[in-house]
Amino acid sequence: MAAKGDTFYAWAADAACQEKGECGGAVTALLTHALKSGMVDAVLAVKKGQDLYDAVPTLITDPAEIAQTAGSLHCGTLLLSKLVKKYLDGAEKMRIAVPVKGCDAMGLYELAKRNQVNLDNVLMIGLNCGGSVSPVSARKMIAEKFGVNPDDVVKEEIDKGQFIIVTKDGQHKGISIDELEEEGFGRRSNCRRCKMKVPRQADLACGNWGVIGDKAGKATFVEVCSEKGANLLDGAVKAGAVKTDAVPAKALEIRGKVENAMLKLGDKWRARYFEGLGEGNDRLKKIMDETSRCIKCYACIENCPICYCVECSTKKSYLVEPGQVPPPFMFHLIRYAHISDSCINCGQCEEHCAMDIPNALFMHALQVDLQEMFGHTPGVDMELPVLALVEEKAERKRLSDTGSDQIFNIFE
Amino acid sequence: MISDPDINHVKHALESLEFLVVQDIFLTETAELADVVLPAACYAERGGTQTSTERRVQMWRKAQNPPGEAKEDWKIISELAAKMGYAKQFPYQDIEEIFNEVAALTPSYHGMNYERLNRPEALHWPCPSEEHPGTPILHKEKFAHPDGLGIFAPIEWKPPAEVPDAEYPFVLTTGRILWHWHTGSMTRRSATLDAEVPTGWIEINPEDAKALGIKDKEIVRAISRRGSVEVPAKVTKDIMKGVMFMPFHFAECAANILTNNALDPIAKIPEFKACAVKVEKITEA
């Protein structure tokens, strides 16, 4: 019987699933088992869209369709957390299995704290993630750095510090991520700063780090992170859907080394980006200059996994004068005030920004400062944020009754 | 009834028609005057192609069926044609068939088909053959004249048909704003955009406003030789003295009640950008 903290090598028993999936197809087999066994009502995952650089979130209730989501897609992957809130009723009436990157898991926790997602009904299959690449930059990078027509690429992967592509005619070509990133290509900037590489707040954490010897490329390293995760793995093994093997001590050590190297890389990029932002008035000026391009399209707010209010303060005419572009700076100040203590650096506000404002960098920099000051880390567990977690309606009534504008007095 | 100049004249003309059919996605101000309204499909409810001013021919993809009795434009026209006895000339089963006919009949579209258009950058006409990559930039090397050179002709400046005088002392210019599109038949039905900009205004320079005794946000009466509207004043130094500006998207304070339908002699574009107006304070009756 598996228990929290246990680690296994796992792979799909089914040959087709092994072939279609990444590293032995364990995740595909686990998702299929979760659906087949009735442990969940549906699976929310991403499948290939128009091309290799496009990913489409899809809700699956027929186990036969899960194979469509097998295999890695590093370029189109967007955040799944808010989709659960917006389109799946916060998993209130449906049990859903979701393969999650670190940011997806963190987003789900933050939404759960705000009563927007019912985590009891969410089964999270964590995926180790070294980062993702924006589709536009990926196409450019493949054309310019790899000298390959992006439409001729049939597979891409990130392994051993390299971005690797496989072309139609079976050629492999890899370039080191460090080299690509020094030249402005490579991973999204929020991914570079990310330090949630193994999502242990999920029910299982799965990946290829630490899979060595004859299992390399043929098995997935699975860490059991909760009782729910243990039940899924045990059930899948018992049903003959997934096979497991013990993890050699050396493999555990290697996985730890890879994770640590990734965390150090995250620190390096944080230092670089945050230093570039400057401090105090310099930072404020930089933020004001950059946000002066804002067209008030609301993509940042729509896609933020922390934003959930029905009545958004940015739409109050006494706070933000309507009909102005760029909107008054108060628009951005409201976002910083409401989100920064809980920002999980998912990058959505920057990815979706039509004006290429580095929104995620600003918010993440604020979050890291607040974390130092108050010791609260968002996205890792159900600990409530420092600043402002309120029942929206009750709080609006309290503010109106008392005539106060203090949502929460942090100096009390 | 919103976007044409001299709306009172437009109304008179439309009301004088024997029979008016309007095909639109909403019951617009014009549709209200129609004998028959044919409910059409919006952009998300139909497929097809759209050619933009930059000559890019892009595909539209249908996301959902039109609501209620609404139909895609090509179906409305085909069915109407069939009723009128032209079923043979409009035998279309789908939109790709129609595009193929367009491409076959239009030399600059000859090289286009759905397979080639199905990519983000699409194709720009002229694209005369299937091997032709399309023409994103026209006249890049030379113009179409035999010697390859363009012809530039100077034009003498002429004043607008109507210029300010003692009775109508201000120039009224009209235009668009960021938050609404054209007649507002779509954007004014968006709660979000309505919250940003709920109605129109007339921009008045602070010096002119002071002379007229008008304050910011005060409802004033703007009058031209064609008609008058009541509209909130926006006192701002963004507009120069002697000139006033109104966005034209708003039926309740329609700028085009005031505008002049004098036409450019060649392009036939109405003089939306200049007519003469006066502005009055509204005094209680």
Image: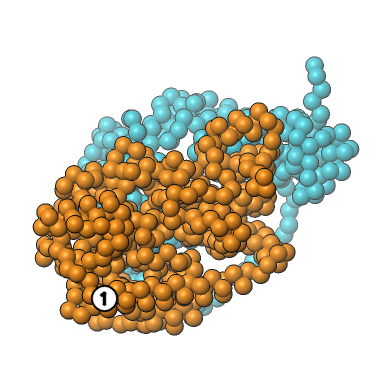
Chain colours: A orange, B cyan
**Residue drawn at (60%, 41%) of the image:** A313
**Residue drawn at (54%, 43%) of the image:** A389
Compared with B186, A241 (above or below) is: below
**Residue drawn at (87%, 33%) of the image:** B213
Give residue A135's position: percent from left, percent from top. 40, 66
- Is B157 positioned to the left or the right of A129 in the image? right
Give residue B282's position: percent from left, percent from top. 79, 25
Compared with A26, B232 (above or below) is: above
- Residue A377 visible here: yes
Give residue B219's position: percent from left, percent from top. 75, 30
Q: Quadrant of residue A157?
A: bottom left
Q: Residue furthest top?
A: B285
The answer to which of A259 and B251 lies nearer the viewer is A259
- For the residue marked with disc 1, what is the amino acid? Ala
Is the N terminus of chain A in the top left, top right, bottom left or bottom right quadrant?
Answer: bottom left
Compared with A362, A86 (above or below) is: above
The answer to which of B277 and A89 lies nearer the viewer is A89
Q: Secondary structure at mark 1?
A: helix
Write down the chain letter for disc 1.
Answer: A
The answer to which of A274 and B61 lies nearer the viewer is A274
Count of numbered labels shown in the rendering: 1
- Residue A65 visible here: no
Give residue B218's position: percent from left, percent from top. 77, 32
**Residue drawn at (24%, 55%) of the image:** A230
Q: Residues within 10 Å of mark 1 (few under 14, many from 20)?
A: few
- Is B92 positioned to the left or the right of B161 in the image? left
For label 1, the residue is A249
- Is A51 positioned to the left or the right of B239 in the image? left
Compared with A401, B119 (above or below) is: below
Is the C terminus of chain A in the top left, top right, bottom left or bottom right quadrant?
Answer: top right
